[in-house]
Image (spheres, rainbow, N blue to C red):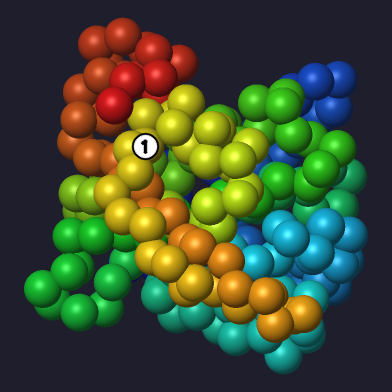
Amino acid sequence: MSNAAVPSLPQAVTIGSREITLRRIGGNDREAIIAFARSLPEHDLLFLRRDITQGEVVDEWLHEAEAGEATTILADAGGAVVGYATVYRSPLPWTAHVGELRVLTAPTMRGLGLGRVLTGYAFDVALALGIEKMVAQMTLDQEAAIATFQALGFRPEAVLRDHVRDRAGRKHDLIVLTRDVARFERERQTYGVLEAFGRP
């Protein structure tokens, strides 16, 4: 399924004092994505699927989005990318019910709720794609990111020791967190989005 699965976009939201447009990723976003990636702290890049500071890698991502292999929602502030959420669905039939969620925001936008908003739209995507289980991965020392995902109802499922190697050659443990999509949706309909995000 393609990016057409993303509901209600583009959408304007106010985060802090900034007006942000949430929209589907597009072919004209290459340079803005690279600029966003190159503005990130080095450690933020560790848990990404790929090195999006490189143009050819961003080209692959844009191709995947166009082909429907990944669905990405960008947070756009006046033409600058300040965050994104991507849902990858497993291409294997025995894990087609599992999606991987990647959410990343600019350091200046953290703690303001942008990640929570992006994640809400990512769950809408997961429902549209028939995904039943969402998986998020990050290094164990990224305590703030882990706390954010746990506040969104994700729970630890595994820790993979020495699974990630940074550019300096240091190894890091990787934590895998998961969230049941149908349960999230039931809780969102019953309690509202904020309460649903806070329930395991």
Query: Which of the two residues, 47 or 187, is positioned nearer the viewer here?
Result: 47
Q: Is residue 131 visible?
A: yes
For the C terminus, the quadrant is top left
Q: Which residue is at 72% across, 90% downward?
A: 56
Left/right of residue 134 with respect to residue 52 in the rendered view = left
Q: Which residue is at 88% across, 45% downward?
A: 78
The kind of residue tagged 1 is: Phe
Quadrant of residue 43 in the image? bottom right
For the N terminus, the quadrant is bottom left
Query: Which of the two residues, 107 or 36, is positioned nearer the viewer here?
Result: 107
Q: Is residue 151 above or below residue 29?
A: above
Residue projecting furthest to the bottom: 56
Task: State how many labels appear.
Answer: 1
Query: Which of the two residues, 18 or 141, is positioned nearer the viewer here?
Result: 141
Residue 69 in picture, x, y percent from top left:
40, 75
SS of the residue under disc 1: loop
Q: Which residue is mark 1?
A: 154
Residue 118 in picture, x, y percent from top left:
56, 39
Q: Which residue is at 60% across, 73% downward?
A: 171
Residue projecting furthest to the top: 191
Q: Is residue 194 above or below residue 123?
A: above
Residue 41 in picture, x, y percent from top left:
83, 57
Query: Which of the two residues, 106 or 174, is positioned nearer the viewer here?
Result: 174
Q: Is residue 86 visible?
A: no
